[in-house]
Image (cartoon, rainbow, N blue to C red):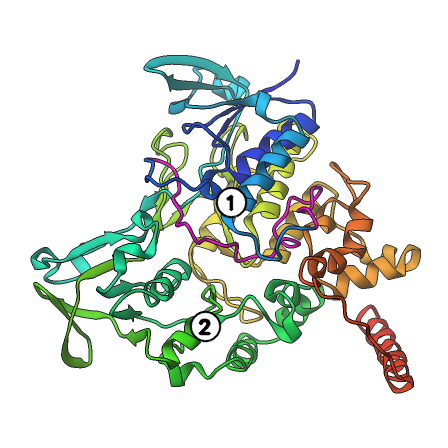
Amino acid sequence: MTKRVAIVGAGVSGLASIRCCLEEGLEPTCFERSDDLGGLWRFTEDVEEGRASLYKSVVSNSCKEMSCYPDFPFPEDCPVYVPHSQFLEYLKMYANRFDLLKCIQFKTEVCSITKRPDFTVTGQWEVVTLREGKQESAVFDAVMVCTGYLTNPYLPLDCFPGINNFKGQYFHSRQYKHPDIFKDKRVLVVGMGNSGTDIAVEASHLAKKVFLSTTGGAWVISRVFDSGYPWDMVFMTRFQNMFRNSLPTPVVNWLIAKKMNSWFNHANYGLIPEDRTQLREPVLNDELPGRIITGKVLIKPSIKLVKENSVVFNNTPREEPIDIIVFATGYTFAFPFLDETVVKVEDGQASLYKYVFPAHLQKPTLAVIGLIKPLGSIIPTGDTQARWVVQVLKGVSKLPPSSVMIEEVNVRKQNKSSGFGLDYCKALQSDYITYIDELLTFIGAKPNLLSLLLTDPRLALTIFFGPCTPYQFRLTGPGKWEGARNAIMTQWDRTFKVTKTRVVRESSSPFESLLKLFSFLALLVAIFLIFL
């Protein structure tokens, strides 16, 4: 009998979950509360309750080759970093390519998901939904929750003394859509994540004055990285990941700081992170240093006091007149349709084994997809999670006993550093490549580099030294994509085809050819030493 699976949300993870269920012969039904797919990537002028919101100028922070579904590359003519409108079109192309729309019920809100009385035997769930004012109930064999973590704004007004006396305008960054509201205003943006930095930079083109307040600072990098390559295609390689994880954390932190400061010295711009022992997601912004050095954005410490028409910052006695305050203070997440006995959220974390399965359930028939912050794209991460979940639902992949899973979850919550590699000590943070490889191992889909080195050495070298593009994740195992090898070998061609709009004839000299030969020989020696 075909298992019926309820999927909550038709964003990037929801679409991947539908696809993986269909791929393995399951029967998915996706409930989406809005009238279209896309989740975060669907821009609307109004903020919709229960759905992520974005501003008009949003562009992806991960390049197209690193943020696509593993068996569905972006079109060649798509920009390297994708504006939200084209990203949404890509998601619609994906949904049409794999015929996913037939499984989605739009304008349908999930009210509750509860265990059936015979759950310990069947593992089934009762799902109550609301559509056009009418409630309906249905029984499903499994549930995949794909609602993300960017729907509930975190606005700790108690942390800002005097905010209730402020006569200007203030709002959470979730409400921001266009920079026009900042024209000729004195603007303060609180919080230096990607959204806060983007908003401050946009405001600086129209506002009279812009302040960016940060408590801990941040590393800022450009999408255009070494030699003009996309930052994540340079940073996210298996070789670099292995190298970083083999070094003591203080050494890695020193190397990271040296690399981050190679663009500009963060201390000179008031941006250097106060805590450099733990990894905080770097801020992606191509303009910020230029706006600071021209006086368009002023970096300030945390707020000491908010007055009627001004703000006093810590360690700076001067009052700064302010008209608008934007709180880019992040988000919290919750599952209002689930009882706390199913998934409990505490301190920004949920008790989920490998960020997916509730560790204590008698039957592993409920999973959460996309509730993770890898230093990489969420799309291939969610796709890999969904593939693993489907194999568990089919009984092909087995989970450890509950006691083992609970212990692992508790250890993770303690946020203890291993002492090696990058220190991922914040809630939901994870090492992208290591995490995905672990899930691929569970389903027998992790590429075997030693075997490939013997049978297809060119591919093996590209996988190990080149960018860890998502195509690697469907190179083998369940859900194998026949086009994966070709996609890997042509990834750089697709990356720069859209930027090479002026053809330049390249000339090569004998010296360059000789240098390439020596480089290749050195590469072979390095590989030999690594795999000994």
Q: How many marks?
A: 2
Dividing the image into 4 quarters, which one contains the C terminus?
A: bottom right
Q: Amino acid at mark 2?
A: Trp
Residue 27, x across and y down, in percent: 61, 20
> Which of 266/24 is in front?
266
The residue to which callout 1 is attached is 85
The residue to which callout 2 is attached is 219
Horizontal side, residue 127 vs residue 86: left or right: left
> Which of 324/442 is in front?
324
Tell which tag, 2 or 1, sits nearer the viewer.
1
Horizontal side, residue 347 vs residue 63: left or right: left
Q: Is residue 58 magenta?
A: yes
SS of the residue at dot 2?
Answer: loop
Q: Amino acid at mark 1?
A: Ser
Which residues are the magenta region?
Answer: 50-76
- Against 219, residue 487 (above or below) is above
Dividing the image into 4 quarters, which one contains the N terminus?
A: top right
